[in-house]
Amino acid sequence: MSEALLYIQTEVLPALFRGFGVSVALIVPSALAGLAIGILGGVLRVYGSTPVRRAADVYASLFRGIPLVIQLFIWYFGLPYFNIYLSPFAASVLGFSLCSGAYHSEYIRGALLSIKRGQMLAAESLGFSRIRMIVSIILPQAVRRALPGCGNEVIYLIKYSSLAYMVTCIELTGEGKILASNSFRFTEVFLIVGVCYLLMTSVAAIVLSRLERALIIPGFERQRT
């Protein structure tokens, strides 16, 4: 066995598997929380009162406009000035969730605005309350329409989860950087790291594609062949 293969087997793979687990632990709650925040934010941006709409718009503008790495620095290095201390993992999940939620809210907002007003009038004529109308009739349609965009955001989240090591949360990229810095085998290490991210994004793309097909309503949306 060559020296390079031995190094990969004994040093690289165990460390990267450990980092892979941390990355997955970061991505899953961040994706779920981001989607929940995005749905709430999108609804508030369309159906909230004027002050609520403005506040939700400000949230979306801020978190889409400020680079994610700056947001992570604020949560991890900035909050201690207010005597609030977050672990690297918690700061990363918070940053990913809020940033992802801002993008999701834009997709949901656009989808909500695409729903014909006649459906709302019909629901009101049947005695539906505003909340029930949104939750039961409008939002399910909007989520289906926004799913391709939201799916892209999940894939982006998988990739920018690599920024967590900037706040000392040692995930896949962090483990790779440590290994490469110690051994100077940057090519071998980061090729494997890249393959790991490609694997995660490919699995996510397949799952999201199947979810889109499962949610298609025959007669209302064109099915892909």
Image: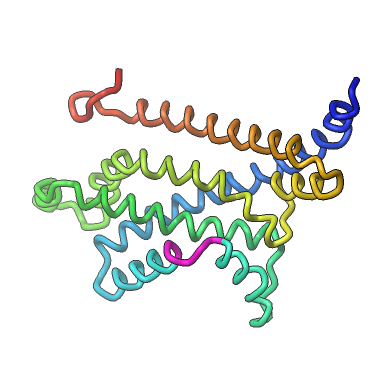
- Identity of the residue drawn at 37% across and 53% down: 39
Left or right? Give the position of 11 relative to 60: right
For residue 27: magenta? no
Q: Give the magenta range.
A: 63-68
Quarter holding the C terminus? top left
Quarter of the view holding residue 187: top right
Residue 160 image point, x, y percent: 56, 50
Residue 83 appears at what percent x and percent y? 68, 80
**Residue 37 vs residue 73, the one in the foreground:** 73
User: Horizontal and vertical percent for residue 151?
Assistant: 42, 40
Q: Quadrant of residue 211?
A: top left
State the scheme by which the image is colored.
rainbow
Magenta segment, prevailing SS (helix, strand or loop): helix
Which residue is at the front of the view, 201 or 87? 201
Residue 49 coordinates in the image, percent (x, y): 25, 70
Residue occupying the point 21% across, 56% down: 129
Name the quarter where the N terminus is drawn: top right
